[in-house]
Image: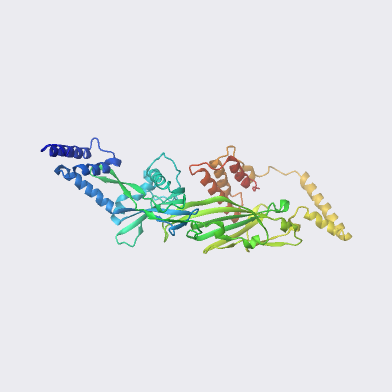
Amino acid sequence: MLKLPGKTAGFHMGQLAKTLNGRLTDTNNPLHEDIKYRYLASALVVTKNDPFTLGLKKRSDYLDELLSEIQVKTTVDGPNTVGVNQEFGIVISVVHTEAMGRVARFGQYLSNDTGAVVANTKRRGVQVRKTADTKGPRDEFEQTLNDTLSPFFTIRSITFALPDVKPRSTNRPGWEETPLAYVLVRAKDASVDKIPPVQMELRFIDLSGPVTIPATSSETLLKVATTSVLPRPAEKIEVIQTLDTRQFAINGSLTLDVSASATGLVPDLEDLLDLSPMTNIVKVRQITPIDPLMVKELNTWADNVAPRSERRWQVTLDGDPIRAADKATDLPFPTVKAAKTTTTWRTYQDMDPIALTKSSVMLDRVKVSAGAGLQAVLKSAENPWNLVVAVGLGAALLAWLAVAFFKKPKGPRPLRARDIYKLPEALHGFSVVALLRRILSSDMVNLSSAQRIDIKQDIAKIEHACFNGVDSMSETELKSLAMKWVGILR
């Protein structure tokens, strides 16, 4: 066009500028908000020197001024040096002026429900499923994060802040930072050296209606080490160690269930516990991760932005040496390595988990083995008077059992918890969670504090497996969890 002879070039350039300006100001058939800014920027590249583009230039300067008050930011949670197989977090946030924070409404990108943007909700952050079918702003944001980060990282989960997230103060006067999401990732290999730029589509309103402006973060440098590295930051770590002795008398089976939660990322088991006090007495047959590292919520209101995470393992022990011993064995629990850690020790009494006041469990093969009562009677036969007493007690016990068996109850038997709470006919996540919640809240079921913690953990496990977009728990596993709690009912 510029190579046209004489004044023809200027005439056609003016006509183009008029057409572009008219298209951008057309209120009857407006441009879609997602292409309006790009259309404007591209038009100015061609017609920037034409006098008819003055209006376009003013609008472009206005939108550019908005962008100058917003910076998308990616931050590594903790040190920027990570292990090649280590999971770590990336915090996605927006740094902005105080005035822009009031105008931009960043909470709209954290929910698919437009009503949730301004609602004072109490719900926790949600881990959304990874899918190309977007249903709203949060899904679009989640899809953008997946598309940007997945070439370099294996994405474990994306946890969003609440839609009513509050901005945090910064060291720069007049500026604030609003955290939006926490991405749990693992580098695909040691060649990864940065977090790529993340782009957000920011929505505003100008005189012509809604407009979407792309804002992009800077690259964040990262070092992936092939040698050992320090665990990721974690504090307020809570560990529950439960030694399961219910099968010990039958086959010598001992299992240690370790569940941990933390503000930050729960460390690996070898960084969390020292197993040597226990393994000095019994051997470890297998260590099985039951629940992988899971981010339950994003804490944006404390001194530092940090996730609340959970993790669980099962340690299978060889109890045969204890059964073979002639005397009782005091089996200690593992000790904690991580700082700022509180520990609860538990074991089972019959079928119920109970909390312990000390960090060990006394195991005696005579007291817990099958047939111990018979052995005691046989030993007492060495004294004839003891044998007479034993036979008399046995006869009295048989008489009492006979009376109890043949005595007919008067009136109908009152309903018990096991008469009401039964295994659901249709086994799926909703039905099993509903059953466990009814058992937890029932006045007919007397759960200990340890059992209440245990059933809440099972409910959270089912919800994470079945309600997170991927149904990863089989019907057999659901039935096993349901039977576990139905079986304790009286």
- Quadrant in the picture for residue 323: bottom right
Residue at image point 34% right, 60% down: 170
The correct choice, above or below, for 336 with respect to 478 in the image is: below
Nearer to me, 8 or 354: 8
Q: Is residue 415 visible?
A: no
Residue at image point 81% right, 56% down: 375
Nearer to me, 36 or 104: 36
Residue 152, image x, y percentages: 43, 48
Farthest residue, direction top: 29
The correct choice, above or below, for 139 with respect to 194 in the image is: above
In this picture, residue 23 sits left or right of residue 305: left
In this picture, residue 382 sits left or right of residue 143: right
In this picture, residue 159 sits left or right of residue 390: left
Residue at image point 23% right, 35% down: 28
Residue 364, image x, y percentages: 73, 59
Residue 65, image x, y percentages: 25, 52
